[in-house]
Amino acid sequence: QVQLVQSGSELKRPGASVKVSCKASGYIFNSYPMNWVRQAPGQGLEWMGWISTNTGNPTYAQGFTGRFVFSLDTSVSTAYLQISSLKAEDTAFYYCARERGIQGMGRFDPWGQGTLVTVSS
Amino acid sequence: QSVLTQPPSVSAAPGQKVTISCSGSSSNIGNNYVSWYQQFPGTAPKFLIYDNNKRPSGIPDRFSGSKSGTSATLGITGLQTGDEADYYCGTWDSSLSAYVFGTGTKVTVL
């Protein structure tokens, strides 16, 4: 079945970096865009941007430029989110989500199970 | 803060109906498709409604979506205790060139 499996929880110090993986299975990886969504504890969903799994071209939402990098390894059907210079306010669940339709249509299905990144000294 | 506004919470007794509103503008809901997502505590969101009113396979017809102007609505009929969750609307915002989610609504079954 179509599924996205993300890497496990991370505990990082402020200023460190983290790389979250999202491994896809059950479909042709480079046929569907991959989106990233952040959810701070007890808060709502926030779209971070997306990456074309066909060209590797990333697009970042406002507020997610500079320290956030989307990348791919198509040989293992995996998308990555790297966050550098971590801050306490980066503490959140990070989800990958496949766009089933044309990018922007918001047919996010499925979602990864989420990766909790905790930034604390 | 989100550009899509939802009520923080709605509630009803088992078997009853609830509706959740999602209010936006011409740059988002007014000119783009709306999706809805269901999220249980501690789990990832689940795709519930797309293209304003379509249900993915496996979603019961107790869930329905509609859109009028710059607002969208999610309806849940025959409410069950298993429907207790947070619900989010979402759509593309052409002015922001970004996908935006609503503020989220917690459904409680009394």
Image (spheres, grey):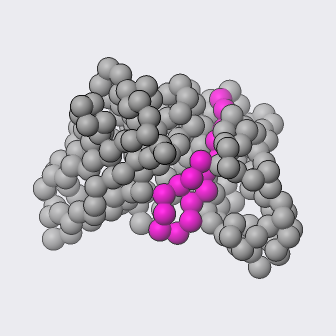
Which of the two residues, B21 or A112, is positioned nearer the viewer here?
A: A112
Residue at screen point 75% across, 39% down:
B53
Residue at screen point 15% across, 71% down:
A121
Q: Is residue B35 above or below residue B32?
A: below
Q: How far across and down, in percent of the image, does residue A85 sit?
A: 16, 51
Residue at screen point 31% across, 36% down:
A77
Q: Which residue appears farthest toward the right when viewing the image?
A: B16
Give the image quarter of residue A117.
Answer: bottom left
Residue B19 appearing in the image: no
Q: How far across and down, in percent of the image, does residue B79 sit?
A: 79, 67
Give the image quarter of residue B30.
Answer: top right
> Which residues fall within the magenta stretch?
B32-47
In the image, residue B19 lies in the stretch drawn in magenta: no
Q: Is residue B86 above or below residue B22?
A: below
Q: How far across and down, in percent of the image, does residue B44 sit?
A: 48, 57
Residue at screen point 15% across, 52% down:
A17
Residue A87 appearing in the image: yes
Give the image quarter of residue A105.
Answer: top right
Q: How far across and down, in percent of the image, does residue B23 sit?
A: 70, 45
In the image, residue B34 lies in the stretch drawn in magenta: yes
Left or right: A28 as drawn, with respect to B79: left
